[in-house]
Amino acid sequence: MVTGPRAMAARPGGPLTGTLSVPGDKSISHRALMLGALSVGETAITGLLDAEDVQATAAAVEALGATVERGDSTRVWGRGVSGLAEPADVLDMGNAGTAARLMLGVLAGQPFTAFMTGDASLRRRPMNRVIEPLSRMGAQFLARSGGRLPLAITGRPDLLPYDGALPVASAQVKSAILLAGLAAPGETRVVEPAPTRDHTERMLRAFGADLSVQDTDAGREIRLTGEAELDARPVQVPADPSSAAFPLVAALLVPGSEVHLPAIGMNPHRTGLFTTLREMGAAIEVANEREQAGEAIADITARTSRLRGVAVPAERAPSMIDEYPILAVAAACADGPTTMHGVGELRVKESDRLAALAEGLTACGVPVEAGDDWLTVHGCGGPVPGGETVATHMDHRIAMSFLVLGLASRHGTAIDDAGAIATSFPGFAELMQRARAGIAAAG
Ligand SMILES: O=C(O)C1=C[C@@H](OP(=O)(O)O)[C@@H](O)[C@H](O)C1
Ligand SMILES: C=C(OP(=O)(O)O)C(=O)O
């Protein structure tokens, strides 16, 4: 069903309170479905994120011959590392960069040609970063100019193992190479210029792959033995820290608030936002730190805090890559400027996030300066003026960030289209309403 844009508005109001259950982690959900499809036996996944990006991955693994059964938990019956079936139609990865890039790694090790496309946002995003290393391993591609979707990939079950540095500090690229490396005889070795989220490594090990990680002078080195056999394992998906970031920052900004966010994923490569917000003076309490199925989780409490601007170092970018939009919202309400360094990757996400943030914040009365790979937000030291409708550019994180800004503004905000929110956090408006936030459909 095709629906038109759906405007949504956020207005300032009373304190946000309550215990909020944030949906499952998007990164881990994609990986659980893909490893389930590549393994032998039944993979039972609890807490799988039911959002459009993950639905695209589920549809793709089904099109490749795996069986996916949805219920209280999701059950996947896989076909082995190089045992997927030629899909009868184009794989449509929707809005999901992670799904597209990781799936190309999976397809590189299969003995057939597959076609892949995505929505208008995904068709603009660079795929050369995976096309180049996977081509070196022996996969063949036919892609639109600039290595963009739609593309065709012809894989082979006897790939050459990869040995070398990653072209970019990207968990998606690293994961694509490792997933392809499963089908390559010999050892695949990747060196990361900066450590990125390691969900793939953790899950591959849990599924029985022979994988080791060590820090070297050149960077973090991951070695994987190819021609692997994966044994299906149960996966418990933690709540997504990138989704938790929205109610958490809203609680920091709206006077008198206190929200509890239980069982949030605390993978150390995902917690850069919490570090930065604490440096800004945020009252964030982390309790009951524990491990769940190989990933760290904890319960988080956030209370209203007076924030001050900070400089965010470039080295922190990989651990808070998706959180810069909501950090920019926190920065807009802080005392003094916040500068985010080394954030050029934001220009190739679902939208050019630096441009979308600069445009939206300026419209809401917040002074901003942006360069190729940096952004400075001059905080208003309290509620921002607001009173505008912000363009979301098919970007869920831009959409949710500007709704949170509206809660912390004098005149509220609106977004032109809330449709993109469903890619990662379909129940966002309802969850915020349960905390008493004034977020609702507009017009
Ligand atoms: O591997 C993943 O699950 C992700 C990696 C990051 O992308 P990059 O690998 O492009 O940095 C992140 O922005 C994306 O939302 C999810
Ligand atoms: C960048 C993101 O996702 P993806 O690359 O999977 O589209 C995101 O969720 O913010």
Image: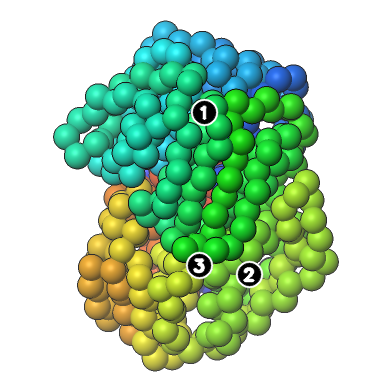
Q: Amino acid at mark 3?
A: Asp
Of tags 3 and 2, which is closer to the observer?
3
Residue in the image at 53% along x and 85% along y: 280
Crowding near the residue tagged with mark 2, few <14, some 14–19, many ≥20 C-alpha atoms within 10 Å = many
Left of 46 or right of it: where is 242? left
Q: Which residue is mark 3?
A: 217
Find residue 432 and report its horizontal and vertical position in percent. 59, 58
Q: Amino acid at mark 2?
A: Leu
249 and 112: which one is in front?
112
Left of 397 or right of it: where is 226? right
Mark 3 / mark 2, whichever is N-terminal:
2
130 and 6: which one is in front?
130
Q: Given contact means CB atoms under 8 Å apart, are the residues at marks 1 and 3 in contact? A: no
**Residue lying farthest top?**
88
- Position of 31 relative to 14 (above/below): above
Give me the disc on residue 184. 1
Q: Which residue is mark 2?
A: 16
